[in-house]
Image (cartoon, helix red, strand yellow):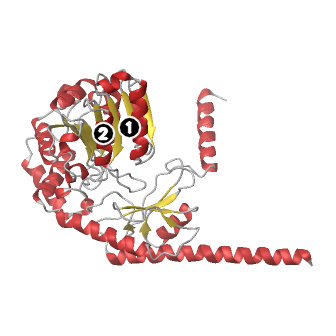
C-alpha cells in the first residue's frame, strides 16, 4: 500500500467511525420551494427587494472603487471606502472605532489569540462559540477557565478563585477577559449581561475586568434599529469590545468587534451571511489588532461587492426601514411560543425553554433526524443538531423564525411536528402491544 493510499484509508476509517456514531456531517441543498425555518436570516434580508435595490445603487455609485481589494489590508488591500464603512458601523453601534475582518470566526480567533497578555486569564461561558476556543488555544493567557452556562453565581465563584489565586488580579496589574454571547445559537437563550458586568466590577474594582460579548445572533433583532442587546441595555461604555457579524440578520456575511475604554467586548454577528465581521473597540485596540491579529494580517481584504452589501444593510437599519421586520420577528416569536405550549407532554419531544428570548427554538428529542426528515418531507427546512455540537442527551431540531415567515406557515409546521409526535406514540403503543402478545404466547 502506497503512502497516498494509507492516508486515505486512515481518513476513511475515521469517517466510518463518525458515521457509526451518527455524527458524520454532510453538505446538503434544500429543495426548491421549501419554507425556511432553519437559516439565521432573521430579517429575511437575503430575499429583500429593498436590500437588492440599495446594493445595486451602491455599486453604481462606487464605480471608481476596484471590485477586488488586491491584497491584505497592510499591503494593497486597504481603501478609503473600507475605512469609511468601519466608521459608519462604529457610529451606528455607538463605539469609538471598528476593524473589519473576513468572518466572525477570524475576528474572534484573532482577538483572543493576541489581546490577552502573558499572566492574564480568560473566563468563558461553557457554551461559547468554537471561534473563541480557537483563539484561546493560540492565546498566551496564563489560564482559560469555563463557568456554567449563563450562571452568574458560578461566574462569581470562578472570579473569586482567580482573584484569590493571584493577588495581582485584585490589584489590577493583570487582566481578566470574560467571554460570553448575547444570544446562544443552539439554545436561543440570552446572557444576563448587566448581572455579569456587575460581578466583574465587584471582583475587579480596579477596572481590569473586560467582558467580551458576541452579539452575532442579536444584531438586527435587539436594540433600537437593530443595534443589538448591548445598545438596548445602554452598556456601550462598559464594554471592552463587541463583535458584530454580517452573515445572519443582515444577509451580508462577516463580523465586527467593538470595544470601549471601560472594558467589555460584544460581538454582533449573525444577521448578514457568513463572510465579514467587525470588531468595534477603542482606537488603541484597533491599532493593536492591526499589528498583531494574524487572521487580519495574513489574509486578502474584502472586495467591493461584500462591502457594498454590508453598507447597504446598515443603511437600511439606520434609516429605520427594517424596524417593521424587527417587530414582525417578535410577533412571530410570541405566536410560535403560544402554539408550542399546546403540545402534549411527551418523551419524544420537549421544548428547551419556557419563555421566548430569541427567534431560535430548540425541540429536544431522542430522534432529531427522524423529526427533521419528517418536516423536510412536508416542505419545511429544519436541521437536526446532534453531539458533539450539543451535549449528549440534548440532541434536537433547531427552528429559526424569520420576518418573512407567516402565521399560516408556523401553523403548518406545528401541525407537522404534532403529527410526527402522534406517530411516534402510535408506534410505541403498537410495539408494546406486540411485546405483550409475544410474552403471552411464550407462557402458553
Residue 212: image tag: 2
Residue 224 vertical placement versus 284 (above, below):
below
| Residue count near mark 1 (Cα–Cα under 10 Å), binned few <14, some 14–19, many ≥20 | many
Residue 200 vertical placement versus 118 (above, below):
below
For this view, does 334 lie left or right of residue 87? right
Front-most of residues 180 and 307? 180
- What residue lies at 27% left-to-right and 62% top-to-bottom? 44
Report helix, strand or loop for mark 1.
helix
Residues at marks 1 and 2, CA–CA distance in whole angstroms: 10 Å
For this view, does 90 lie left or right of residue 214? left
Q: In which quadrant of the rendered image does the N terminus lie?
A: top right
Q: Where is residue 82 in the image (x, y as percent from the top left)?
A: 15, 38
Q: In which quadrant of the rendered image does the C terminus lie?
A: bottom right
Q: Where is residue 285 in the image (x, y as percent from the top left)?
A: 21, 30
| Residue count near mark 2 (Cα–Cα under 10 Å), binned few <14, some 14–19, many ≥20 | many
Front-most of residues 424 and 275? 424
Residue 249 vertical placement versus 18 (above, below):
below
Front-most of residues 38 and 204? 204
Q: Where is residue 167 in the image (x, y as percent from the top left)?
A: 37, 22
**One can see residue 213 in this view:** no
- What residue lies at 19% left-to-right and 67% top-to-bottom? 324
Q: Where is residue 394 in the image (x, y as percent from the top left)?
A: 53, 56
* Nearer mark to the viewer, of 1 and 2: 2
Residue placed under numbered mark 1 in the picture: 132
Disc 1 to disc 2: CB gap under 8 Å: yes
- Residue 405, by quadrant, is bottom left
N-terminal-most mark, 1 or 2: 1
For this view, does 148 lie left or right of residue 444? left
Amino acid at each position: 500500500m502506497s503512502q497516498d493510499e494509507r492516508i486515505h484509508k486512515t481518513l476513511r476509517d475515521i469517517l466510518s467511525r463518525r458515521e457509526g456514531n451518527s455524527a458524520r456531517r454532510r453538505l446538503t441543498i434544500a429543495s426548491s420551494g421549501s419554507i425556511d425555518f432553519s437559516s439565521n436570516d432573521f430579517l429575511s434580508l437575503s430575499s429583500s427587494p429593498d436590500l437588492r435595490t440599495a446594493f445595486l445603487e451602491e455599486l453604481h455609485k462606487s464605480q471608481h472603487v476596484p471590485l477586488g481589494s488586491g491584497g491584505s489590508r497592510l499591503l494593497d488591500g486597504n481603501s478609503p471606502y473600507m475605512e469609511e464603512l468601519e466608521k459608519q458601523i462604529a457610529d451606528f453601534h455607538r463605539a469609538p472605532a471598528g476593524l473589519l475582518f473576513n468572518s466572525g470566526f477570524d475576528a474572534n480567533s484573532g482577538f483572543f489569540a493576541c489581546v490577552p497578555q502573558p499572566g492574564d486569564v480568560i473566563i468563558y461561558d461553557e457554551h461559547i462559540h468554537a471561534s473563541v476556543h480557537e483563539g484561546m488555544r493560540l492565546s498566551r493567557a496564563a489560564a482559560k477557565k469555563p463557568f456554567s452556562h449563563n450562571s452568574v453565581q458560578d461566574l462569581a465563584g470562578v472570579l473569586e478563585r482567580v482573584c484569590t489565586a493571584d493577588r495581582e488580579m485584585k490589584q489590577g496589574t493583570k487582566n481578566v477577559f470574560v467571554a460570553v454571547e448575547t444570544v446562544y445559537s443552539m439554545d436561543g437563550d440570552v446572557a444576563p449581561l448587566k448581572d455579569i458586568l456587575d460581578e466583574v466590577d465587584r471582583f475587579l474594582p480596579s477596572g481590569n475586568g473586560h467582558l467580551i460579548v458576541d452579539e452575532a445572533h442579536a444584531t438586527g433583532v435587539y436594540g433600537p434599529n437593530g443595534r443589538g442587546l448591548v445598545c438596548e441595555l445602554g452598556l456601550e461604555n462598559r464594554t471592552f469590545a463587541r463583535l458584530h457579524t454580517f452573515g445572519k440578520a443582515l444577509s451580508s456575511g462577516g463580523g465586527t468587534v467593538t470595544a470601549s475604554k471601560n472594558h467589555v467586548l460584544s460581538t454582533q454577528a449573525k444577521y448578514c451571511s457568513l463572510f465579514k465581521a467587525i470588531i468595534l473597540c477603542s482606537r488603541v485596540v484597533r491599532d493593536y489588532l492591526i499589528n498583531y491579529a494574524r487572521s487580519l494580517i495574513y489574509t486578502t481584504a474584502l472586495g467591493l461587492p461584500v462591502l457594498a452589501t454590508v453598507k447597504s444593510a446598515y443603511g437600511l437599519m439606520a434609516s429605520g426601514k427594517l424596524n417593521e421586520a424587527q417587530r414582525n420577528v417578535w410577533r412571530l416569536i410570541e405566536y410560535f411560543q403560544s402554539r408550542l405550549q399546546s403540545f402534549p407532554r411527551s418523551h419524544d419531544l420537549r421544548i428547551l425553554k419556557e419563555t421566548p428570548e430569541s427567534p431560535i427554538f430548540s425541540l429536544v428529542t431522542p430522534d432529531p433526524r427522524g423529526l427533521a426528515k419528517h418536516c423536510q418531507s412536508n416542505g419545511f427546512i429544519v436541521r437536526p443538531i446532534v453531539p458533539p455540537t450539543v451535549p449528549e442527551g440534548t440532541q434536537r431540531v433547531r427552528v429559526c423564525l424569520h420576518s418573512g415567515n407567516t402565521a399560516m406557515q408556523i401553523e403548518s409546521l406545528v401541525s407537522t411536528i404534532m403529527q410526527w409526535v402522534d406517530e411516534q406514540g402510535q408506534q410505541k403503543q403498537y410495539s408494546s402491544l406486540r411485546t405483550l402478545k409475544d410474552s403471552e404466547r411464550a407462557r402458553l
